[in-house]
Image (tube, rainbow, N blue to C red):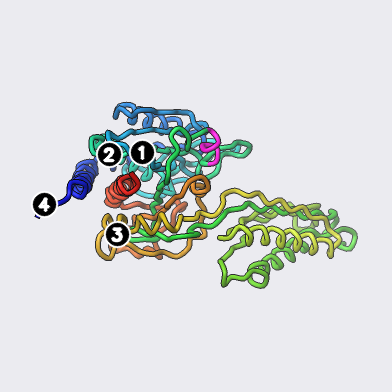
Amino acid sequence: MTMPHSTLAVATLADAIDTAAAALEAQVIAWRRDLHEHPELGNREFRTAGIVAAHLNALGFDEVRTKVAHTGVVGVLKGALPGPVVALRADMDALPVKEEVDVPFASKARAIWNGEEVGVMHACGHDCHVAILMGVAQLLAGQRAQLRGTVVFLFQPAEELPPDGEDGGAKMMIAEGALQNPTPSAVFGLHVTSRLPMGIIGYRPGPTMASSDTLQITVQGRQTHGAAPWLGVDPIVTAAQVVLGLQTVVSRGVDITHEPAVVTLGMIKGGNRGNIIPDSVEMRGTIRSFDEAMRDDIHERVTTLAEAVARGSRAGCTVCIRKNYPVTVNDPELTAAMVPTLQRVAGPGRLELVNKVTGSEDFSFFQRVVPGLFFFLGVTPPGHDPKKAPSNHSPRFFADERALVTGVRALAHLACDHLAANA
């Protein structure tokens, strides 16, 4: 039986993608190791951006824009066949973490972050993301004759938040036109994770990763001698009451049958001697949620509770909540359309519907402009329990590089399948 021409073309391109990805695997791993050994913090990805831009230019991309949102790179690759536009994204920045993994390409880098000298490590796997997308760029550039439409490559800085006092990340890339001229009809991105075994792909339609908000509470008391607390106002005791009160915001005030939420205080600081009640105590934390209305309600509850507790102790209280990233919402229609592609790439039994993730992602900003799908790629080696593996952001985070070729195949197939289906 003779296959229809269009079906044959799709099959031929799909086979070509897999063959090219296998041939690129060693190069992708080499790129990843180089990037891992030379990590750079948010808005300071100068070397990384230079490598990416040179690579895209060498591939003959139709357009390569640099210095987008400080250090971002946007590449435009036009296929030989007419069709729509799709975008692929990789984040480039590392974390202020000192590496503790014993590999030959371990990072020894140090840098200044918010005024403090720190170790620098790709503890979240963004080196993997950049190497994967560089591989996709080379692969699709080699398939231009069969490529329908246009692929926009977004190499993004500062996903882990820019330094204090600076703008950056996806939101700034969008403001500077990264999704314009051309405007994609969909955007895809991935994240490596130690929570899944090597090569497993995880996805979820709808709300997938939480919004992220920074919480800062300052309780203002009145300093006095620790032996005579009645002569002042104790902000430490008041802060302790605020901490305990905040535990009821979610457990007693939020309908968790609708969506989960988290209010966490990760820092508390006040005083410098055991016999002096200080003037003030500062607390810092994070708020995570999966619904924008619930998010605003939690903010109001946190503020009201902290201020009321402090007032009851005759202390002052300032609550500052800064919205960072919105909820990462995978477009349900787009996700349903692309699940067969992910299933084909992952193979039998290797595509998983995952639970919601209380971590956050500024990929969510891209999804507010165009429909998007963000998925996960497992990197925990066989024989190791993902539940016990060092998590992303750990100084001991380890990625099994054999998963990278699956990432290359996934993004390449997603792009080409979406373009073909909407041509």
Q: What is the total number of numbered labels drawn onto the structure image? A: 4
Q: Nearer the viewer, residue 370 or 327?
A: 370
Q: Are marks 1 and 2 in contact (CB under 8 Å)?
A: yes
For the residue marked with disc 4, what is the amino acid? Answer: Thr
Whether residue 251 sits left or right of residue 333 in the image: it is right
Give the x, y percent position of residue 279.
81, 52
Residue that numbered label 4 is attached to: 2
For the residue marked with disc 1, what is the amino acid? Answer: Val
Residue that numbered label 1 is attached to: 151
Give the x, y percent position of residue 122.
42, 44
Q: Are marks 4 and 1 in contact (CB under 8 Å)?
A: no
For the residue marked with disc 2, what is the amino acid? Answer: Leu
The alpha-carbon separation of the residues under discs 4 and 1 comes to 31 Å
| Vertical relation: 87 (above or below) 308 | above
| Vertical relation: 142 (above or below) 380 | above
The kind of secondary structure element at disc 4 is loop
Specify which label sits upstream in the sequence, 4 or 3.
4
Residue 147: which disc? 2
Whether residue 323 sits left or right of residue 408 in the image: it is right
Residue that numbered label 3 is attached to: 343
Q: Nearer the viewer, residue 369 or 105?
A: 369
The alpha-carbon separation of the residues under discs 1 and 3 comes to 22 Å
Q: Residue furthest right?
A: 231
Q: Nearer the viewer, mark 4 or mark 1?
A: 4
> Bounds of the magenta span?
171-176
Specify which label sits upstream in the sequence, 3 or 2.
2
Mostly what secondary structure, the magenta segment? helix
